[in-house]
Amino acid sequence: MWLAGELGLPDLFTLRIGGRGFPIVWSIVSSALLVALIGFLGVRRRR
């Protein structure tokens, strides 16, 4: 949420929870990038 706000990205599908907006699209994108990064760092090379 913070990074999307700092970069000025539009809120595409925002869900209201407790009066606050939760950007669903950017949450999904950031989760996918985090999983890709963990997968990239966790790859062990076979010899």
Image (cartoon, rainbow, N blue to C red):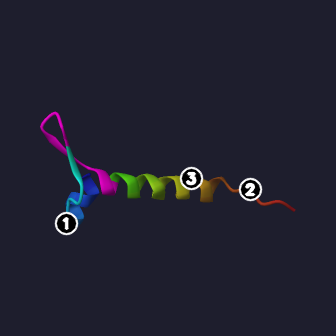
**Which numbered disc covers residue 44?**
2
Residue 43 percent coordinates (x, y): 69, 56
* Real-space CA distance between mark 1 and mark 3, rounded to the nearest whole angstrom: 26 Å
**Which residues, given as a range, are shown in magenta?**
16-26
Mark 1 or mark 3: which comes first in sequence?
1
Residue flagged by tag 1: what amino acid is it?
A: Gly
Name the residue carrying label 3: 38
* Quarter of the rendering containing residue 18: top left
> Please, is residue 27 above or below residue 46 in the view?
above
- Per the image, is 27 magenta? no
Residue 6 percent coordinates (x, y): 21, 61
Residue 10 percent coordinates (x, y): 20, 64
Mark 1 or mark 2: which comes first in sequence?
1
Q: Residue at x 47, y 58 (%)?
A: 33
- Per the image, is 17 magenta? yes
* Real-space CA distance between mark 3 and mark 2, rounded to the nearest whole angstrom: 12 Å
Residue 45 percent coordinates (x, y): 77, 60
SS at circle 2: loop
Name the residue carrying label 1: 8
